[in-house]
Image: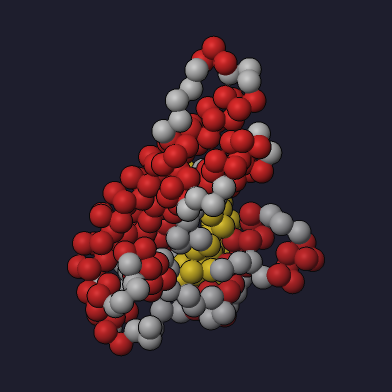
Amino acid sequence: MTSAALDVFGGVDTHGRTHHAAAIDGAGRLLGDAEFAATAAGYAALLAWLGGFGQVVKVGVEGTGTYGAGLGRHLAGKDVAVVEVDRPDRKTRRRQGKSDPIDAIAAARAVLAGTASGAPKTRTGPVEAIRALRVARRGAVKARTAALNQTHGLLVSAPEALRAELTGLTTTELVARCAGFRIDPARLLEPTVATKAALRAIARRVQALDEEIAVADARLRPATSTVAPRTAALFGAGPDVAGQLLVTAGDNPERLRSEAAWPI
């Protein structure tokens, strides 16, 4: 059996450009800490550095779904056990403050103690593809909401005749009416004309975003139906809802295979 002194447990504090790693042995003694580039070459160097101390047993990585995604994939590809570390030990941070070495060491010790045991977010497979598609859709929905809020804000202070013309319309009718306004460029210093010009620009933006959302749904619908057919077929579970459930479940093969047993 490998001695405790040769067992190496790693912890990594991840950032956008660099990762800070720490290594401890099976008795919790610090073996060292170092910083590596958040690149493929940096991941390889980090693993080689850990292996230089002995047999790498397990590595705790912060943010395997964000900054640590690339490192998590690299370690898993090298058959290294990886666990998700949610955050550094709060008592340590209160006592010593925020620092990359401290956070990395805390992550390693959390792995050794077993307090960090979360499954890493793999960011691979069909669920990752669905997540990426949903990012674009969510951005379009957010922009559409902001545009409609701007429209209603303009209407509150619009000239009375224009406001009376547009009051009582549904959102669809309002967008269509505003998008069809004709604007005389020579009269843009008139409040009514300027307000119409602004409303038309915003309405056409909403229409473009509606098309973008429709395209996103058309892409998500077959994707979610393929990965989770039972969930996607439920009444009221459109492609975005089904996609959200899948992203929440993650790419874990066992969870995807048990989709039929998901509580809905």
Q: Is residue 117 above or below residue 142?
A: below
Judged left or right of residue 11, residue 218 is: left
Residue 2's image quarter?
Answer: bottom left
Name the residue located 33 percent from the left edge and 45 percent from the top edge.
Answer: 211
Q: Would you place residue 160 above or below residue 22 in this image?
A: above
Percent position of residue 232, x then y: 27, 72
Query: Is residue 70 visible to us here?
Result: no
- Asked which quadrant contains residue 243, the reply is bottom left
Nearer to me, 98 or 109: 98
Q: Nearer the viewer, residue 112 or 154?
A: 154
Residue 53 rendering spot, x and y as whole percentages: 47, 62
Residue 187 image offset from top left, x and y in percent: 57, 16
Q: Quadrant of the N terminus?
A: bottom left
Q: Is residue 158 left or right of residue 41?
A: right
Q: Which percent across, then down, holds residue 24? A: 56, 68
Q: Residue at 59% across / 72% down in the picture?
A: 109
Instruction: Work out whether 187 lies above or below 152.
Output: above
Asked whether, in this view, residue 142 is left or right of residue 234, the answer is right
Q: Quadrant of the C terminus?
A: bottom left
Q: Residue at x 53, y 81 (%)?
A: 114
Q: Nearer the viewer, residue 211 or 89?
A: 211
Quick one: 120 or 175, which is closer to the camera? Answer: 175
